[in-house]
Amino acid sequence: MNISCELIKDLAQPYFGGRVSEKTAKLIEGHLEECDECRYFYSGRRSVKTPHFKVEFSEPEEEQIALNLSRLSKRLQIRRTIGTVLAVITAVLGLSALLYDLISEHKK
């Protein structure tokens, strides 16, 4: 099958991203073996080809899920603690300002 150079160049990004089928990858590679212009174009894009394969996702292990939940729980606890401390500091500063104002008014 004769594929145009324009089409081969349009497929460069999906090809290097591993987002073309195995059949399409073989067609591109076959064209690159015969066409110096496209081979030069592809060599300028990326020196190492991304392998063409399907990525299979496996279910996370229960231990990994438990570890991630534990880390998340610790982060949330730290954030709550920081929030509480900041609220207490704000309240103390507010009360201090109010008492200072009352005391200074009383002295006058």
Image (cartoon, helix red, strand yellow):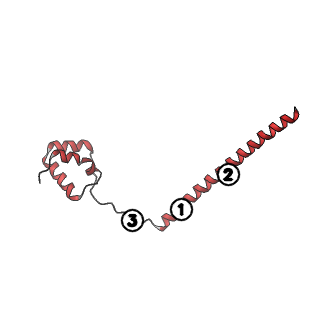
Name the residue furthest top.
108
In the rendered structure, find residue 69 and report the number of the disc placed on it.
1
Residue at which label 2 appears: 84
Task: Write down the quadrant of residue 18 in the picture.
Answer: bottom left
At horizontal 44% and vertical 65% (from top left) the residue drawn is: 60
Tell me which amino acid carries mark 3. Answer: Ser
Relative to 54, 66 lies left or right: right
Q: Earlier in the sequence, mark 2 or mark 1?
A: 1
Tell me which amino acid carries mark 1. Answer: Leu
At horizontal 81% and vertical 40% (from top left) the residue drawn is: 99
At horizontal 80% and vertical 36% (from top left) the residue drawn is: 101
In the depicted view, which residue is nearer to us: 42 or 87?
A: 87
Relative to 82, 6 lies left or right: left
Residue at which label 3 appears: 58
Circle 2 or circle 3, nearest the eye: 2
Question: Circle 1 sits in a helix, a strand or a loop, which is it?
Answer: helix
- Quadrant occupied by the C terminus: top right
Question: Circle 3 sits in a helix, a strand or a loop, which is it?
Answer: loop
Q: Position of residue 35 (x, y in %)?
A: 14, 45
Tell me which amino acid carries mark 2. Answer: Thr
Residue 91 vertical placement versus 68 (above, below):
above
In the depicted view, which residue is nearer to us: 92 or 46?
A: 92
Q: Position of residue 71 (x, y in %)?
A: 55, 58
